[in-house]
């Protein structure tokens, strides 16, 4: 896999860095995002086909603003600077950057002002998306200004040295010709020939996993969700039944989920799966606990116990398969640094060192939608691929207050109704995540002629692309009305339904 054509994107903390990576991959070129501090030798050792310098929130004149090693602009590979990246090029190579007196944001029309390899095939006048503060006032010696907006420099290049820069963002949909610009850089200028695709990924990944695991054995904790299932399927394709999977019923899954998912794993996907019924253990430990962080910690710790016991029962393993995705990996390299822990997300990363398992993370290079695509290549059932994300601590963080079998029962029934109605209205796939939250309050109602004093549930449905930010879904009132009507009629113990209209931030998706 080391010989594949790779583009490196240096991340200066811009909001669109991941989008650049997605676009480059959509154009069939493999790329990696690296922190701005990655040294010259590490970048050179990747033999990049080209280098992209991302945008960023800083002014190049800010104290501590990220800079680059000038050797990166030495002509060993083509470079495309975007926004902050363009300003860095200008600064490092002897141009002049003027600090902004205002930030420019939005659509701008630019005019081409000289022949350009980067803008090849584009109209003389094009619409682009700007989001920046500083401006390049004077290009460095040897550079030609290839596009302007009024007097402002919007694109420049030194084709001899292979250094290109744009003030605007070609990676966003608001720049209609952006794809062509990136294509020109990747194919025309950098000469990339490979076609990165999920089909090519499968064969390369299977070969790499075989090499890593060798004759060894691997285990994997399955959750019923997309990431762990696709990771396990890929490893299974590489090493067959030397992979043992473990799926734990922690008593906090949705209605019928354990049985249904086990059935899919076994009969449709032919994975070697041990199903562990451990609901009692988890629920016992959760008795009397209402604090969300304590719930999460207890569930995480208990999960590790169960997993460890089962792993020992199934014979010795050398490798642990995890469905870590690319956004989890790059979180730690960005200039923003590792994000603050808002909620402690539980996974099997906390396994004791004594188990001495080496990690296999075959999805480390992929984005969520690429994992779905990979799943399709591997014939993972659509039912699993289209499934909304579900948190490790499951219904416990949706059952506000104490987690009891009776309250979980109410939650399961109401949640099933909500999801059924979303599917019936063809809204399920439009929504990132939808679920019901059982509140720790009772409300007064009237049913027939009698006064009731019963549970309140909240419906939560959000749209999102990565779960980092989210907006509440605009579900039609008629659908909400059907859900509310059915819940109160069909689920004993609920007399009121509310809809959560909070976005993230400032709220989170889950309530706990
Ligand atoms: P929040 O609530 O932080 O959730 O906005 C963002 C996304 O993460 C999921 N989530 C979890 N996933 N273990 C997980 O595997 C967890 O402990 C956990 N907590 C939240 C949440 O469902 C949403 O998709």
Image (cartoon, grey):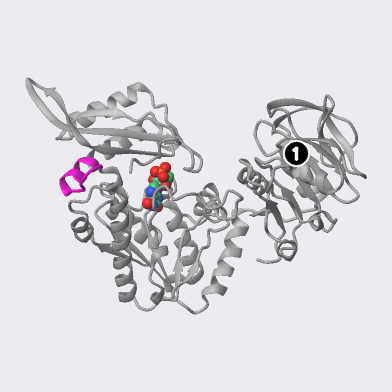
Residue 170: horizontal and vertical position, in percent? 71, 37
Locate residue 498: give its quadrant: top left
The residue drawn where x is 66% and y is 30% is: 174
Residue 65 falls left or right of residue 345: right
Residue 230: horizontal and vertical position, in percent? 47, 57
Question: Between residues 121 and 401, which one lies in front from this camera angle?
Answer: 401
Q: Is residue 403 magenta?
A: yes
In the image, is residue 486 above or below residue 262? above
The residue drawn where x is 29% and y is 66% is: 306
Question: Between residues 167 and 335, which one lies in front from this camera angle?
Answer: 335
Say which element carries label 1: helix
Residue 409: horizontal and vertical position, in percent? 19, 44
In the image, is residue 298 above or below residue 316? above
Residue 274 falls left or right of residue 186: left
Residue 495 falls left or right of residue 254: left
Q: Which residues are magenta?
A: 400-411
In the image, is residue 92 above or below residue 511? below
The residue drawn where x is 27% and y is 55% is: 259
Asked whether residue 260 appears in the rendered view, the answer is: no
């Amino acid at each position: 896999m080391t010989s594949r054509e790779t583009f490196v994107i240096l991340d200066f903390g811009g909001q669109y860095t991941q989008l650049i990576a997605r676009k480059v991959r959509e154009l069939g070129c493999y790329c990696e995002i690296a922190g701005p501090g990655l040294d010259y030798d590490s970048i050179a050792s990747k033999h990049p086909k080209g280098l992209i310098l991302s945008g960023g929130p800083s002014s190049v004149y800010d104290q501590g603003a990220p800079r680059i090693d000038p050797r990166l602009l030495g002509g060993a590979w083509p470079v495309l600077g975007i926004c902050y990246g363009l300003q860095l090029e200008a600064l490092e190579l002897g141009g002049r950057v003027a600090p902004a007196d205002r930030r420019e944001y939005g659509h701008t029309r630019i005019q081409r002002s000289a022949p350009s390899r980067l803008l090849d095939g584009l109209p003389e006048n094009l619409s682009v998306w700007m989001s920046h503060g500083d401006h390049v006032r004077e290009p460095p010696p040897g550079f030609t200004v290839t596009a302007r907006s009024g007097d402002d420099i919007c694109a420049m290049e030194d084709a001899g040295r292979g250094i290109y820069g744009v003030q605007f963002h070609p990676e966003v949909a608001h720049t209609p010709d952006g794809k062509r610009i990136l294509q020109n850089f990747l194919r025309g200028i950098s000469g990339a020939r490979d076609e990165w695709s999920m089909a090519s990924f499968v064969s390369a990944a299977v070969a790499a996993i075989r090499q890593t695991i060798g004759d060894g054995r691997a285990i994997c904790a399955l959750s019923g969700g997309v990431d762990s299932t696709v990771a396990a399927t890929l490893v299974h394709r590489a090493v067959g039944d030397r992979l043992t999977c473990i799926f734990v019923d922690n008593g906090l899954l949705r209605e019928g989920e354990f049985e249904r998912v086990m059935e899919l794993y076994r009969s449709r996907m032919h994975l070697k799966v041990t199903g562990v019924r451990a609901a009692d253990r988890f629920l016992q430990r959760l008795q009397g606990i209402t604090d969300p962080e304590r719930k999460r910690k207890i569930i995480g710790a208990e999960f590790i116990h169960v997993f460890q016991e089962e792993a020992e029962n199934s014979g010795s393993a050398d490798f642990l398969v995890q469905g870590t995705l690319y956004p989890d990996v790059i979180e730690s390299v960005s200039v923003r640094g590792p994000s603050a822990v808002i909620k402690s997300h539980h996974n099997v990363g906390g396994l004791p060192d004594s188990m001495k398992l080496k990690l296999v993370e075959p999805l480390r290079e992929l984005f969520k939608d690429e994992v779905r695509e990979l799943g399709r290549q591997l014939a993972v059932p659509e039912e699993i691929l289209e499934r909304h994300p579900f948190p490790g601590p499951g219904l416990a963080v949706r059952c506000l207050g104490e987690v009891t079998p009776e309250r979980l029962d109410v939650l399961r029934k109401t949640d099933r109704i909500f999801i059924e109605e979303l599917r019936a209205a063809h809204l399920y796939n439009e929504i990132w995540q939808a679920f019901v939250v059982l509140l720790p309050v009772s409300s007064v109602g009237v049913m027939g002629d009698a006064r009731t004093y019963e549970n309140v549930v909240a419906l939560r449905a959000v749209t999102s692309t990565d779960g980092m930010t989210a907006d509440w879904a605009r579900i039609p009132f008629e659908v909400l009305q059907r859900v509310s009507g059915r819940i109160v009629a069909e689920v004993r113990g609920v007399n009121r339904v509310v809809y959560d209209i909070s976005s993230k931030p400032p709220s989170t998706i889950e309530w706990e």
